[in-house]
Image (tube, rainbow, N blue to C red):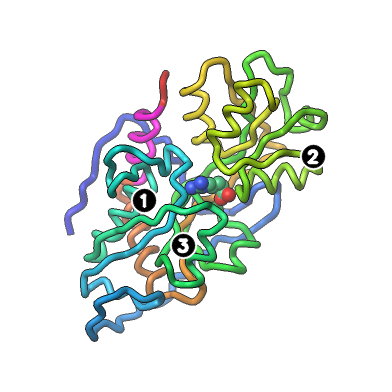
Amino acid sequence: MKKGTKSAALALAAVMMTAVLTACGSKADTAGSNTVTDTTVGGSQAENTDADVTPENGGTLTFGTNAEFPPFEFVVASGVIDQYDGIDIAIAKKIAEKNGMTAAIENMEFPSLLVALENGQIDAAIAGMTITDERKEEADFSIPYYTATQVMIVKEDSDIASATDMADKKICVIEGYTGEVCVKDLGYQYVAFKKGTDAIMELVNGKCDVVVIDSATAQKYVGDNEGLKIVEDASAFESEEYAIAVKKGNTELLDKINKSIEELLDDGTVADLGAMYTEAVSVE
Ligand code: ARG
């Protein structure tokens, strides 16, 4: 039961397990169900079929992600798991390890993740995914491991100072992200891109005025591109909580994931990873 705890200077991963408010004020309650651990183990499974992951047998725990969301998941030449790296990838690896398994990553489009869970292509989705009421109808969520909020990325000389200032501006969002939901809820027109980097290019090239996206990812983009800044508006964008999704009803796996997350939160691993990857990807 060793833990590879790393010491880090900053603890940026502010994790709050209290009341959950998802983007744009729609309320959702935390998924954390502390049910009794299912101890049905045994048999010999060569494959991990959905809802039948038996950690004690070893094997692979397949996580789906969308590796377009630094610092949580991004593609590198060689990372923590294959060419994937980031806070979530490191968490996935640790969860698998804690349960005697090896983590595998399947990279796909963000809106495909819950479908992939449903059809058994992946065991769990870890993708900086915000718990929302809509998504809770499609999948079960772990306890949260990270708290974020939507922010606006604008050019340094922009006059946008609050969400309502976006009303007559060209707004860019990422398809299927909670940022899109927020802008839609505000009643504004927008253009949706498949990748955060595409939306940022549009902003840098002056073809859009503002990109609405999650805070830590926004910081990464602002660090990587000259002339951009972040504008926050807590009255328009409320806090969101990231959690791991599993197929509905897969309580066996969910319990294991919850237990692992709890340990990773308690021993400071998640905070350390947050600090480590935020420093690693930031310019200043
Ligand atoms: N937190 C936002 C959401 O749940 C954005 C997540 C995007 N994640 C990704 N891996 N591309 O919609």
Compared with 172, 125 (above or below) is below
Compared with 226, 44 (above or below) is below
Quarter holding residue 111 = bottom right
Question: Disc 3 versus disc 2: distance between alpha carbons?
Answer: 32 Å
Q: Residue at x 42, y 38 (%)?
A: 71
Q: Nearer the viewer, mark 3 or mark 1?
A: 3
| Sequence-first tag of 1 and 2 | 2
Q: Quadrant of the N terminus?
A: bottom left
Front residue (pair 14, 117) = 117
Which residue, given by chain and number where applicable, does mark 2 sit on? 188
Q: Nearer the viewer, mark 3 or mark 2?
A: 2
Mark 3, ligand 1, within 8 Å: the answer is no
Alpha-carbon neighbours of circle 3 within 10 Å: few (<14), some, or many (≥20)?
many
Q: Residue at x 32, y 48 (%)?
A: 90
Q: Is residue 236 left or right of residue 8?
A: right
Which residue, given by chain and number where applicable, does mark 1 sit on? 265
277 part of magenta stretch: yes
Q: Nearer the viewer, mark 1 or mark 2?
A: 2
Question: Disc 3 versus disc 1: distance between alpha carbons?
Answer: 13 Å
Q: Write the start and end of the magenta stretch as one range.
A: 270-281
In the image, farthest residue toward the bottom:
43
Q: Is residue 157 left or right of residue 274?
A: right
Please indicate, yes or no, whether residue 228 appears anywhere in the rendered image. yes
